[in-house]
Image (cartoon, rainbow, N blue to C red):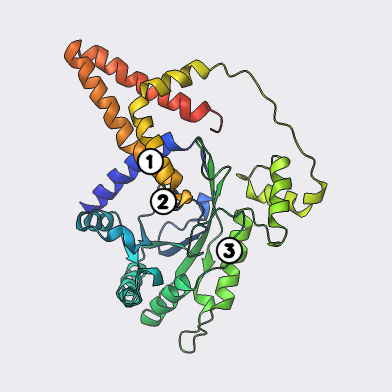
Amino acid sequence: MENIWYKVVRFYVKIGLFFTLKKISVHGKENIPKTGAILFVANHQNALIDAILIPTTNNRNIHFLTRASAFKNKLADKILRSLNMIPVYRLRDGKNSIEKNIAIFEQCFEFLKNEKALQVFVEGEHHQLRRVIHLKKGFARIILGTLQKYPDLNIEIVPVGINYNYHLKYPCSTSIYYGKPINANQFFDVKNPDFRFQAIIKEVRDALKKLTLHIEDTKNYDEILSKLNAANVNYLKPIKANKLLEKVNELVPQNEKRAINWLLPLYLLAKINSVFPLLIWYYLKPKIKDIIFTNTFRFALITTVFPLFYLIQSFIIYIFFNLNYALIYLLTCIILGIITTKTMKIN
């Protein structure tokens, strides 16, 4: 029953992502083992959107670590846990909270022992940098703890590069690159462990640097990024983007060609038709404290307020006219949503 609930919610989330992102392209799914214990390790540039992209772009049933602050409400706690989310505590949650991670890690050990999949954002925080920042040790501690308890278990690490052409704007596009699996067992001496985890951290970070654009030069980061933007480098294709990065000083600025937007009347119609949900969005947007959550809030409205508004409008039409007109209106809303999300230029 729990598996059915997970699949139903995952399907609805996929619909929400369809109307939130212009394009979602997935590469390297053949690298994901169909069975066995897996740790998906990914970069983290777009808050909740990152967290739901991995479970909705592959067929593994995934448990993933989520910031503990999201579990404060009892109802939220119950719902999140039913969707395979596991609270993980950080120093900002209080010194005593860190001790709770012991039980959380034990839970992760059991998931891996049962040959399930875990998802971890190994950078430990989200950011908008076009680079892979230094990795935290949490994922390595989970693997070590699991192997100490179950030394015969085989654990595979699947690196995941999540890329966006724009992080905050609508409708942005994303590409997900699943890298070749890394066998974790070879990096751990269970009887005499090295708690610095330097070898596994380097291996995973090197793998991620190939799956997303990585600007190594932090001192000249802004200048390099400016040149890449001027050359209209496609960040959705990280392998090609990293090659262009090697000759960044040779890149020639490109002028974007402007064409007549024949679909503008439809975009305006879509906005007029969604005026009340949009007013809610314009009210909430300036109140978002961490701007990296911009697309998270946008996704939340697209999956709740917008469809609810259209259903209410359809019901009103049904009362005053008939069911056929109500269904035609509802279908029109869906079509306008598809046209807007899939064809509109970045706003």
In the rendered image, which quarter is residue 287 located in? top left
Disc 2 and disc 3 in contact, CB within 8 angstroms: no
Most extreme residue toward the left, as rendered?
319
What residue is at 69 percent from the left and 56 percent from the top? 221
Q: Residues within 10 Å of mark 1 (few under 14, many from 20)?
A: few
What is the secondary structure assignment of the residue under circle 1?
Answer: helix
Q: Amino acid at mark 1?
A: Leu
What residue is at 81 percent from the left and 50 percent from the top? 249
**Does residue 186 lie above or below 246 as drawn?**
below
Q: Amino acid at mark 3?
A: Ile
Q: Residues within 10 Å of mark 3 (few under 14, many from 20)?
A: many
Q: Amino acid at mark 2?
A: Leu
> Can residue 152 be seen at all in this image of the molecule?
no
What is the secondary structure assignment of the residue under circle 3?
Answer: loop
Among the two numbered marks 2 and 1 on one chain, the one whose residue lies closer to the N terminus: 2
**Does residue 74 lie above or below 173 as drawn?**
below
Which residue is more in the foreground, 313 or 147? Answer: 313
Residue carrying label 3: 133
Among the two numbered marks 2 and 3 on one chain, the one whose residue lies closer to the N terminus: 2
> Can residue 289 be seen at all in this image of the molecule?
yes
Horizontal and vertical percent position of residue 88? 36, 67
Rounded to the nearest angstrom, the CA distance separating label 1 from label 3 is 30 Å
Horizontal and vertical percent position of residue 342? 50, 29
In the rendered image, which quarter is residue 104 located in? bottom left
Disc marking residue 284:
1
* For residue 53, side relative to residue 201 (left or right): left
What residue is at 40 percent from the left and 74 percent from the top? 153
Residue carrying label 2: 48
Which residue is more in the foreground, 346 or 152? Answer: 346
